[in-house]
Amino acid sequence: LDWSGDSTHAEWVAGEVIVFMPPVELHQLVEGFAFSLLERFVGLYDLGVVLQAPFEMKLPDGSSREPDLLFVAREHFDRRTAERLVGPADLLMEILSDSTARYDRYEKFFAYERAGVPEYWLIDPRPGRQKIEVFALSPDGRYRPLDPDSDGRYHSLALPGFWFDPRWLSQLPLPDPEDAILEVAPDAYFEKIRTKYEARRRSPGNGSPSHR
């Protein structure tokens, strides 16, 4: 890990350094969209923190993983250090590409299951696929798939109220994350904007009555 530095996407597993190929443009675009949407939702309700790779998550078996996206709930902030997350995140997302799909679907799937990660999302934006799979940890410690709703959207158990529509993946350019959050959490987002606007109006130098 010292050798790989801060800019190399690499993992430490069973005494071996695994270095990943540089991601393709589609992977980065989808990762950026998913991060922006997830971060906006978590921020609306002050639920925790969302981080992007490369950021180390050290698991109980001693391995170090760098998922594309991870969410850590406030009640688990004791797992955070300045350098890494020590212990499992509450939700993980991996964006599949040709070079990582098999690794994400099998190697990481079982590693995250063993580590007790409550929820694992596989987002496949590749042409001809463009689908999502969501797995939640069951009481027996095994991942079970979550089915979409009647509109085809996938809902999170770890983040109640959060959902993702796979149809967004077939839109190029991808939707504006602000438009997407207005679909996912319209009332909370409008309230946040209203609160910020009112605070700005009341701040010195912005036309408040006391400064006219």
Image: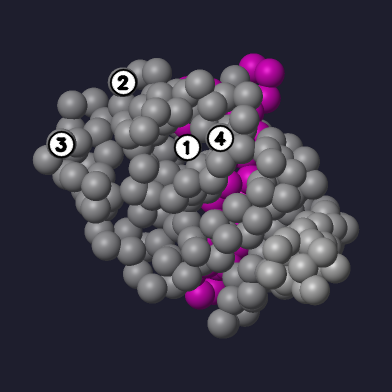
Question: Which one is closest to the eye, mark 3 or mark 2?
Answer: 3
- Of the residues under marks 1 and 4, which one precedes in the sequence? 4
Q: CA distance from mark 1 to mark 4?
A: 18 Å
Q: CA distance from mark 3 to mark 2?
A: 16 Å
The reply to whether residue 184 is visible in this rendering is: no
Identity of the amino acid at label 4?
Val
62 left or right of 35 in image: left
14 left or right of 113 in image: left
Residue indicated by mark 3 = 2
Magenta highlight on residue 92: no
Residue, x 39% and y 28% (percent of image)? Answer: 81
Q: Residues within 10 Å of mark 1 (few under 14, many from 20)?
A: some
- Of the residues under marks 4 and 2, which one precedes in the sequence? 2
The quadrant of the picture occupied by the N terminus is top left
Check whether the beta carbons of the residues at disc 4 and disc 3 lie within 8 A of each other. Answer: no
Q: Secondary structure at mark 4?
A: strand
Residue segment shown in magenta: 111-140
Residue 132 vs residue 26, the one in the foreground:
26
